[in-house]
Image (cartoon, grey):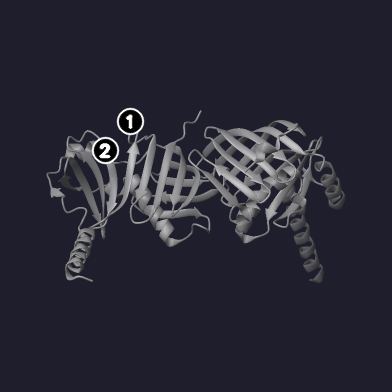
Amino acid sequence: MNKIHSLTTYLLLVSLLLFRFEETFSQHTGFKPIVNFPDFKVQFKLESSKINSIVSDFAQEKVLTALTEKIKSEGKFLFMRNNKVRIEYQKPFTYLVMMNGEKMLVRDNQKDNRINVKSNKLFQQINRIMIDCVQGTMLDSKDFTVKVFEDDNTFLLEMTPVSKALSQFFQTIVLLVEKKDYSAKSIEMREPNGDKTVITFINKKLNAEIADAVFAL
Amino acid sequence: MPKLPMRYLRYSLLLMVAFSCASEYKLLQPAMLEQSCVSKIKPRGFTTSWFTTSVDVVGKHLSGLLLIKNQPDSSTRVVFTSEAGITFFDFEFTKNGTFAVKRIVSQLDKKPIIQTLRKDFELTLGIPFRGVTPEVWTMNTEKWYGVKQKNETSYFITDTECASLLRLELGSTRKKKTEVFIRGKDPHDPDSVQIKHYNFAMQIELRKLMRE
């Protein structure tokens, strides 16, 4: 009887392990978990710190899964270390978001909104996501737990929010980073209801000269 | 203080109170229902569209994208997202008039906010006018087609010739609460929509997004 019990427990454990194993792999097809996370973290920090600026086009696609609707937009993305980001949506609407340290500017067709992100913790957390993703500081973020996977050309960072407040906006954020230069390739924001937004960087220029005035608020 | 100016002050105050209590709808005169006008002008919602959206509420301004989508089951979904893709709310208006919040972020998940938005979109989509025969009034050069719901009435307003829809309105028995202006050649596929509140400072503007 004891033998049967042990065998059953063993089979249950094996099947649970197999299930977990399969689940990990099925989440990101073609990617496998990195072997040594502490080494990766050191290397990632070192390599991404070499990127001082990014000038890039971007394409964004928001998918409303249940409603089978998509909306595509595109524009220009600029980053300068430290903590300076300018995102200009140009098609099919014009919209500008600029972050410079703790200050933020949002400009739509009608108005300029200047926000001190320090006054709102949630706002601060959401705005830091983009900055952390492009300047390689997401592994230090206290707002997310991060799992790292890789294929031949890319690292995949799966970020899961820690707080309840952020969890209502994101189930996970998946960041793809190019192995050749450690720059962000795409950011996919998955929402709890299955909707997702993917931002893909195109025609990236790293460490190009950008005037400070571009980020003036 | 001399007596005469004091008396004037009292009369002025009385007049002000009387004026502010006067119904904005007291000049409405009952009129004959013209079924052809109702069939032609009655708001029936929009075709599925995305709109750039700006909201000004008590001194705060925010913007985003609004999707109005007609579903195969004849329900209509109204989804508001930020330009960067975060969904703020997703409302469902079914064919039989029920309303459901499919999703809303905690910052907006307050009964007065949901009720205000619900009424705004119900009026904009013409939901109060579905399956009912409206009452008709005239005022100045306008024809008012109204449907009463509890303490409020939803109106769609046309010119006397019934050539076009001038606006939609929600009012209590005395006061105008909300006006909706639907602009463009086709009221079912509008270029822009303006929702204006009169009982508190809030205005929503939608501009149709042309997609490639």
10 Å crowding of disc 1: few (<14), some (14-19), many (20+): few
**Residue B199 in picture, x, y percent from top left:** 34, 56
Can you identify the residue that label 1 sits on? Answer: B185
The disc, 2 or 1, on the residue closer to the chain's N-terminal end is: 2
**Hey, what amino acid is under mark 1?**
Lys
Can you identify the residue that label 2 sits on? Answer: B165
The quarter of the displayed image where residue B152 is located: bottom left
Q: In terms of secondary structure, where does tag 1 sit?
A: loop
Up-down: is A179 above or below B91?
above
Q: Residue at x 78, y 68 (%)?
A: A5
> Along the horizontal axis of the image, is A215 left or right of B50?
right
**Residue A177 in picture, x, y percent from top left:** 75, 40
Front position in the image: A37 or B8 = B8
Front position in the image: A2 or B173 = B173
Up-down: is A180 above or below A166?
above
- Give the chain letter at badge 2: B
